[in-house]
Amino acid sequence: MNAMLKSSHLATLSAAVLALALTGGSALAQKKYDTGATDTEIKIGHTIAYSGPASAYGVIGKAIDAYFTKINSEGGINGRKIKFISYDDGYSPPKTVEQIRKLVESDEVLLVFNPLGTPPNSAIQGYLNKKAVPQLFVATGATKWGDPKNFPWTMGWQPTYQTEGHIYAKYILDNKPTGKIAIFYQNDDYGKDYVKGLKDGLGSKAASMIVAEESYEVSEPSIDSHIVKLKSSGADVFYDVTTPKFAAQAIKKMAEMQWKPLHILNSVAGSVGATMKPAGFENSQGIVSSSYAMDPTDPQWKDNPNMKEWVVFMDKWNPSADKTDAGNAYGYNVARTMVKVLQQCGDDLTRANIMKQAANLKDFEPGLLLPGIKLNTSPTDFYPVEQEQLMKFEGDTWKLFGPVMSGEVAG
């Protein structure tokens, strides 16, 4: 009798072991999906300005699409192909809201990835957080994208505008301590964040050093009149917070008037192809900006293995794109970051796990960041990239100088 019981017990145990082996040894091996993910597909939604005043950034969407196409050709991510659905919002917040609702409610995407622009993202942040849909690696450096306590479904990617403003303030204080600063900025959260960063960085000296402030609307066809007014202030430092179209206009107008202050240009307009080339290389000499990524036009990276890999990628998957446009390098970097997160998710493609893995990046290098700069996140740190290096425009490219810097954001 005891032998029979023992035999029966062993049979049951063997069956249990077999069942465990067949399920991968753990309940964690079970596949978990939210809307937008299946055994064969991952739907990713995206909005960007393919038209309108910020259309220079449209190359980013095309670069992302090209990289995802490459990944799909290699078998996808854990056997699943990415279905990338990208819509034009013209940098218009009401249009962004319309397109995002379509992506979530009609296209039924798993997440929204790298939507462009501070005003457009501000318009959709509440909706996506209420719906518990990831608003991941947004293409804007506004400080508010790193607030996991109040907006747990929203995460930034690039350095914050306030951080960058602090870095410029330190440079001005070190090199033009008695300078007179004219500020020119886009009249929205993006522009105001950069202005706050500069003023906070200047501290008590802001009141005496800043002699003029002018803002512009993205709907303005030309900003020439603002530049004329700012020149009349007598400023010898120009803090330029503009997107590529308006940055190029400002550079050309300043050259026309022979106004030659220390020109500090925000990094979001630092593309050689989208800003400096249209403005005229001869007019752009000596402009100071900052970067966290390798510039494809900088010859020092010519033999860098990561840059070589990017060139091969561009030639094969995005051949008609302009390699001098930094938007193509940006799109590549952020797309690789998205792929890394999806790889870490394994077979748990729930929206909650997407955010969990996005907040668990450790010293990740997407390929074209400057040496020494790596992506790190945590459940309380939603700012993946937090360092930059200053650069000066010389000839037909940017020349990096000084150390890699960080600027803490005020709480």
Image (cartoon, rainbow, N blue to C red):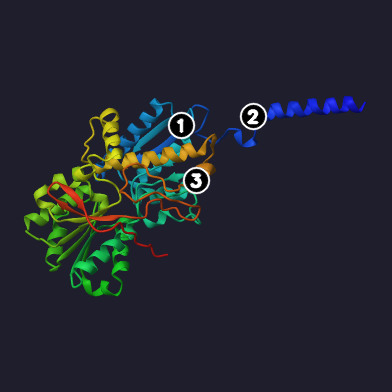
- Look at 14% across and 58% down and name the residue there: 225
Determine crowd level at label 1: few under 14, some 14-19, many 20+ residues with C-alpha closer than 10 A: many
Residue 253 appearing in the image: yes
Seen from the viewer's position, the closer of residues 320 and 214 is 320
Where is residue 7 drawn, in percent x and y?
84, 25
Q: Indicate the secondary structure of the residue bearing disc 3.
A: helix
Check disc 2 and report the residue beneath it.
23
- 393 sits left or right of 124 in the view: left
Determine crowd level at label 2: few under 14, some 14-19, many 20+ residues with C-alpha closer than 10 A: few
Q: Indicate the secondary structure of the residue bearing disc 2.
A: loop
Q: Amino acid at mark 2?
A: Thr
Quadrant of the drawing holding the C terminus: bottom left
Q: Earlier in the sequence, mark 1 or mark 3?
A: 1
- 1 sits left or right of 261 in the view: right
Quadrant of the drawing holding the N terminus: top right
Of marks 2 and 3, the one in the foreground:
2
Where is residue 343 drawn, in percent x and y?
47, 36
Q: Do the CB atoms of the residues marked 1 and 3 lie less than 8 Å apart? A: no
How many angstroms separate mark 1 from mark 3 (CA)?
17 Å
- 383 sits left or right of 264 in the view: right
- Look at 85% across and 28% down and name the residue there: 6
Check disc 1 and report the residue beneath it.
77
How many angstroms separate mark 2 from mark 3 (CA)?
26 Å
Q: Quadrant of residue 256?
A: bottom left
Where is residue 361 drawn, in percent x and y?
45, 47
Q: Amino acid at mark 1?
A: Ile
Check disc 3 and report the residue beneath it.
355
Q: Quadrant of residue 173?
A: bottom left
Where is residue 115 drawn, in percent x and y?
37, 43
Seen from the viewer's position, the closer of residues 72 and 16 is 16
